[in-house]
Amino acid sequence: MVQVILRSNLIALLLVILCAPVSGHERTLVIFADFACTDNAAGDPDDCLAVEALRRTDTVHILAVVAAGGNASAQRSYGLGLSKFPDLLVLPGSHPGAKRSGTTHQRVAKLIAQGKGDVSFLVLSPATDLARLIESYSKVLKRTREIVFVAGRSPGDHFYARSGGKEVRDMNYVKDRRAYKAVLPLLYAKRIETTFVGFRAAMNTTVPDSFMPVGFAQKARRAWHRKTRFWFGAKLPPFDVVAAMAVSQHRNRLRCHYVNIKAGDNLSLSPAQHSYFTLCD
């Protein structure tokens, strides 16, 4: 009887071990960010807040952050990234529209090749550096799990993919159309899951308190609220923090649906039954 009990306990213990969740990070992440996160009223803190939120997330390992031009110059963005995140690997990025790859793209490709498992990309900036990386080191696509873009809009646009579709003037897209036109067909051809998180998602999503960084300076908070109240008529959470949720355990809080996307002068969206492209709004 004792042996039977011991054997049963041993089997139960083995089942617990085998069925227990695997420890470690769910995602290895490369982030492209255009940092402009000063503490004064002119600051645009959402890139810094998004990186900070993910830096504190147990399910994410940030492999590298490429500080690109966009909301600030590439040089200013890089300086802010270094000062705000000394514990992360922050690399200098390109200004929007740059046509050549550089040492940063080579280093990112090498990090991905040397690592284990797939990598996710979060693009909070214009897609210039992502395009240069893929064009020069196409093998990274074989290790790409997913790509998430911040998909903004111009004031007055409703970022909906209604029946018949809609053309959307996305701010990051407009800053480097060439990059998106080069990247998006490749992502579709390689069947890489690609998500666009529109600004309107901030209106329809609740950001968990545990995900919102507490280090949101008071002046920056007031500036952000003034900005979103002026453009959108409401105090909204930082857009890039909402986009960062798409590569975290909080993705299911976003309202997402399949779309077809065409890259012309602007992004053209239309609803789809299934697609490798998803829009969260």
Image (cartoon, rainbow, N blue to C red):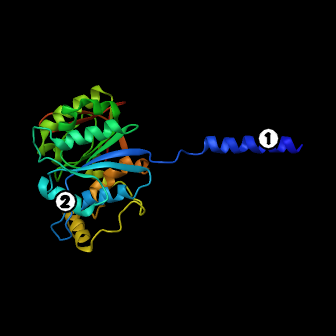
Q: Nearer the viewer, residue 262 or 129?
A: 129
Residue farthest bottom in this picture: 218
Which image quarter: residue 105? top left
Q: Is residue 22 visible in the rendered structure shown here?
A: yes
Q: Is residue 1 left or right of residue 222?
A: right
Q: Is residue 175 left or right of residue 201?
A: left
Q: Earlier in the sequence, mark 2 or mark 1?
A: 1
Three-letter amino acid code of the residue under disc 1 = Arg
Three-letter amino acid code of the residue under disc 2 = Trp
Q: Position of residue 81 (x, y in %)?
A: 22, 58
The tag on residue 231 is 2
Q: Nearer the viewer, mark 2 or mark 1?
A: 1
Label 1 crowd bin: few (<14), some (14–19), many (20+), radius 10 Å: few
| SS for callout 2 | helix
Q: Position of residue 18 (x, y in %)?
A: 62, 40
Q: Position of residue 207 (x, y in %)?
A: 38, 58
Q: Position of residue 198 (x, y in %)?
A: 27, 48
| SS for callout 1 | helix
219 up-or-down from 94: above or below: below
| x 28%, y 25%: residue | 189
The tag on residue 7 is 1
| x 38%, y 49%: residue | 61
